[in-house]
Image (cartoon, grey):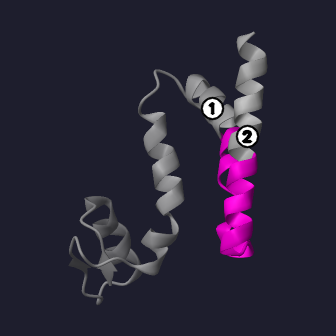
């Protein structure tokens, strides 16, 4: 079994599969760990805040803005992605100009 160097993996692996060899290496990643990359990035943001409530407040606003600026790239052609990004920046510029006045 290949895992990262997190020591909390040792006991569950020994309990579930005692005969399994565990390899821990910085360069070896399992598909499970790679699939959790976004969750890890989001959880890392929580460390910057003094409480979970403040983190949730920031992230709920951030998610709305992130949806505008980061359209689903896999569903778009390159030209339509550039068009969506330009529309997002124009929308943001108009919104900030209205709120500044």
Above or below 15: residue 57: above
Q: Nearer the viewer, residue 19 or 63?
A: 63
> In this figure, which residue is indicated by the disc labeled 1?
56
Q: Quadrant of residue 93?
A: top right
Q: Residue at x 20, y 74 (%)?
A: 25
Q: What mark, if any, has residue 37 been given in the picture?
A: none
**Side of 52 where 27 appears, left or right:** left
Is any part of residue 67 visible from this angle? no
Q: Does the magenta portion include 77? A: yes
The residue indicated by pointer 2 is 90
User: Tag 2's secondary structure?
Assistant: helix
Q: Residues within 10 Å of mark 1 (few under 14, many from 20)?
A: some
Left/right placement of residue 81 relative to residue 10 reads right
Write down the region rendered in magenta.
63-87
| Magenta stretch secondary structure, dominant | helix
x and y percent of residue 61 in the render? 69, 32
The structure residue drawn at horizontal position 47% and vertical position 62%, both measured from the top left corner, is: 37
């Amino acid at each position: 079994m290949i895992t990262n160097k997190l020591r909390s993996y040792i006991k569950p692996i020994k309990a579930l599969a005692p005969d399994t060899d565990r390899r821990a290496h910085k360069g070896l990643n399992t598909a499970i760990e790679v699939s959790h990359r976004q969750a890890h990035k989001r959880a890392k943001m929580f460390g910057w805040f003094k409480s979970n409530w403040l983190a949730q407040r920031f992230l709920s606003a951030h998610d709305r803005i992130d949806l505008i600026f980061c359209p689903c790239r896999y569903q778009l052609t390159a030209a339509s992605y550039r068009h969506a990004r330009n529309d997002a920046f124009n929308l943001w510029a108009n919104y900030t100009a209205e709120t500044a006045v």
